[in-house]
Amino acid sequence: MKRPLIFFIILILSLINIPITKAVGASLYLTPSTGTYKVGSTFSVAVKVNSGGVAVNAAEGNLTFNPDKIQVVGLSKSGSIFDLWTTEPTFSNSTGSIVFGGGNPATFIGISGTIITISFRAKTSGTAKVNFSSGLVLAADGKGTNILASMGSGNYTFSPTVVAPPAEPLPSGVPVKPDISSSTHPEENKWYSNSTVKFSWKLHRDVTGASILFDQKPVSNPGPISDGLFDTKIYDNVSDGIWYLHLKLRNKYGWGQIRHFRVQIDIAAPQPFSIEIKEGKETDNPQPTLFFESKDDISGIDCYKVRTDGEEPEVVTQEEMLANPYKLPLQSPGKHSMIVEAFDKAGNSTAATIEVNILPIEKPQITKYSKRLSLGDTLILEGTSLPNIIIKCYIQKEGKKPVVGEERADENGNWIYAHDKSMGSGVYKIYAIAVDERGAQSYPSQEVTVAVTLPTLLKIGNIAIDYLTVIIVLLVLIGLIAFGIYWGWHKFRLFRKRLRKETKEAEDALHKAFSLLREEITEQLEKLENVKGKRKLTKKEEEIEEQLKKDIDIAQKYIGKEIEDIEEELK
């Protein structure tokens, strides 16, 4: 039957159903949605519908899966809520897809309506997802409304198939010699300071009994009577010495060969001992010779560790100690404490201590040096000491590590040291230490101080002028010049201010005087004008009038120019 025709039939049949008054979302989902399976096994997954409380009569969907992980081995419509199929359930293992589409004139309302069941086979280990790529659920409302609200998915895990190892073949004779091991005493030729011993061995399927014996004999027979069937044995509080475990196993053919396992135990410390110094507890020898020896009756002495003044210990083997007495490394003057630890072959130890006072040789003296050097000068130290010994000169700038130089004193004990390394400006503390051919040292000499400064630029009599002094003088002169310039500029500003004030006053006075003059001349000219109205001016009066007019024009011209010049200067 063609798909459109079937849907048409379903749609017509749905018209007879009661209309849906309220639609709730439906869902398509898989059950189970998770699971763990062995590779190669098959498992079933049901595709189901939850109508969401609404009557439905059709659904379809498209599922996808990873064909590298799983494959479909079959699809089943048995138990489906649908009888009619618009799309016959089919699958493709090459593309990893499953499609279906079905319906039923009768409606379905429920939360777990089975549509189809899928059988998968797990191909490889890992995880595989099965998802809906599309789908629809049609309500039986006479309209074929799609009420699908959600689509679930499945996530499945596959583990490798565990292949059981083939059963161990049963031996055809008596058991082989057992392979014994010990987690507490693994090496048979090594000593251990552990009195608890644990043994273990492997039992084959055919073994029916074990006979065991633990004693101090290298070879023993544990006897023909079985002590039980067990694969471990623990012995506590085992005393010091060499012990052996003897074990044999039995099967239906009889007793097998005996295995002997050796264990060496020593929990006792080496015997107490003392330290002697060949040169005495007070000596000027910087490398005193120590005599010490301990004994251990069980495992024997393995080595000694000698620690001086809490420093890292020096390891001395028993063979080295017996061949040569132990000499301390070079020691500086003063008191030193030594700790000697004797270790046996099981790691147990016993310690002894002693103190020695290393006496110094005569310290050198610095008799001549320059308290002040210029940058680039060579530091020269002169002094006295014991004859023919090495003088180490320590030159230390504040905050820096000292620089060490050496010089040998002559047969009279005189020495001169010239420092050939460059010295930066600053203050240096200097002292010397004497060292003889044995390596014995003195205490440091008295400490002297040398200042290194910039080189001298000029010397006048006993007065030396160096670059620093010149720089200071120049700075002072520059400061004085700057102050003089500032002071002169300040005074000039005050003078200019006063000048502007006085000039302004002169300008105001000139304006006033010119105004008075112009008023006076104007008044005189007005009088002459009045006379002219009454009578004719005399020749003298006419000359006066003419001269007054010329004078006021000249005065106005020159005074105005001077006022303009003053105003320009005041700007």
Image: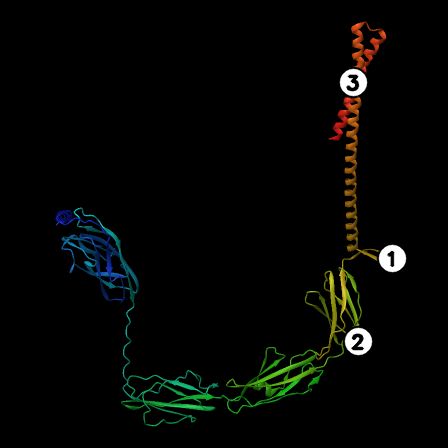
Between 408 and 126, the one lying in front of the other is 126
Q: Nearer the viewer, residue 5 or 527?
A: 527
**Residue under circle 2?**
413
Between residue 513 and residue 491, name the one nearer to us: 513
Locate residue 440, reporting x and y percent: 71, 79
Residue for badge 1: 461
Q: Which mark is residue 519?
A: 3
Residue type at tag 2: Gly
Gap between marks 3 and 1 measured at Cα: 82 Å
As drawn, is 267 to the left or to the right of 115? right
Q: Give the image quarter of residue 331.
A: bottom right
Cβ atoms under marks 2 and 1 closer than 8 Å: no
Q: Can residue 133 be seen in this view?
A: no
Considering the numbered disc 2 on the image, is that residue within a helix, a strand or a loop? loop
Q: Which of marks 2 and 1 is nearer the N terminus?
A: 2
**Could you tell me if the residues under marks 2 and 3 are in contact, i.e. CB atoms within 8 Å?**
no
What amino acid is labelled 1 in the image?
Answer: Gly
As helix, strand or loop, the secondary structure at mark 3 comes to helix
Q: How many labels does the image show?
A: 3
Residue at x 28%, y 69% (from the top left corner) = 161
Of residues 69 and 152, the one drawn nearer to the viewer in this rendering: 152
* Earlier-in-chain disc, 3 versus 1: 1
Task: Name above or below for residue 166 compared with residue 482.
Answer: below
Q: Which residue is drawn at 80% across and 19% down?
A: 517
**Against 149, is 35 above or below?**
below
Quarter containing the C terminus? top right
Left or right? Give the position of 64 relative to 404: left
Q: How far apart are marks 2 and 1 (CA)?
A: 37 Å
Q: Which percent across, then down, holds residue 219?
A: 40, 93
Neighbourhood count class around disc 3 (C-alpha, 10 Å): few under 14, some 14–19, many 20 upward: few
Point 44% across, 84% down: residue: 187
